[in-house]
Image (cartoon, grey):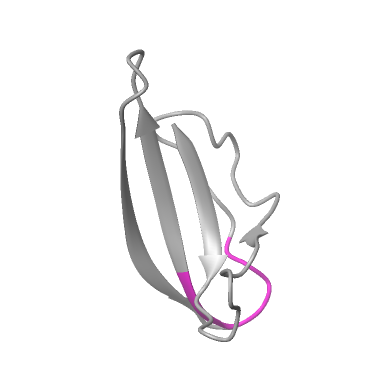
Amino acid sequence: YKWEIYREDWYYPKGPPPEVGLFADSTLPNTNFRAPQKEGPYRVFITVYNSKRYFATANIPIYVVR
C-alpha cells in the first residue's frame, strides 16, 4: 500500500509534489492522516501492490477549509 496526498493544481507541468508527513503510516491498508495546512483542493491517492508486481490505484478529491 502507498497513500499520498497531492494538491490539486493544473499549473505544474509534471504534477505537483506530494504533501509529506500527513499519514500515520502510509504502508497500511487503513490509515489516518492530518489535513494539509493550506486551504484548497487536494486528492488522496492509494496504490495497492501485490506479490506479482501488479498494482491498482484510486483517488478521491477533498477540499481543506481553514
Residue 15 location (% of width, % of height)? 56, 69
Is residue 52 shown in magenta?
Answer: no
Above or below, 52 relative to 59? above
User: Split into 4 quadrants, where in the image is the C terminus?
Assistant: bottom right
Res 65 visible: yes
Asked whether residue 32 appears in the rendered view, the answer is no
Bounds of the magenta segment: 35-42
Name the quadrant of the N terminus. Answer: top left
Farthest residue, direction front? 13
Q: Nearer the viewer, residue 46 or 52?
A: 52
Residue 42 appears left or right of 21: left
Quarter location, residue 12: bottom right
Q: Residue 35 at x, y = what percent?
A: 57, 64
In the rendered view, would you say 12 is above or below 21?
below
In the displayed structure, 65 sits above or below 56; it is: below
- Where is residue 52, by image quadrant? top left
Q: Residue at x 46, y 28 (%)?
A: 28
User: In percent of the image, x 63 and y 52: which residue is there?
Assistant: 22
Q: Is residue 42 above or below residue 19?
A: below
Residue found at x 53% / y 81%: 9
Left or right of 55: which side holds 3? right
Between 17 and 40, the one nearer to me in the picture: 17
58 vs 46, left or right, is left
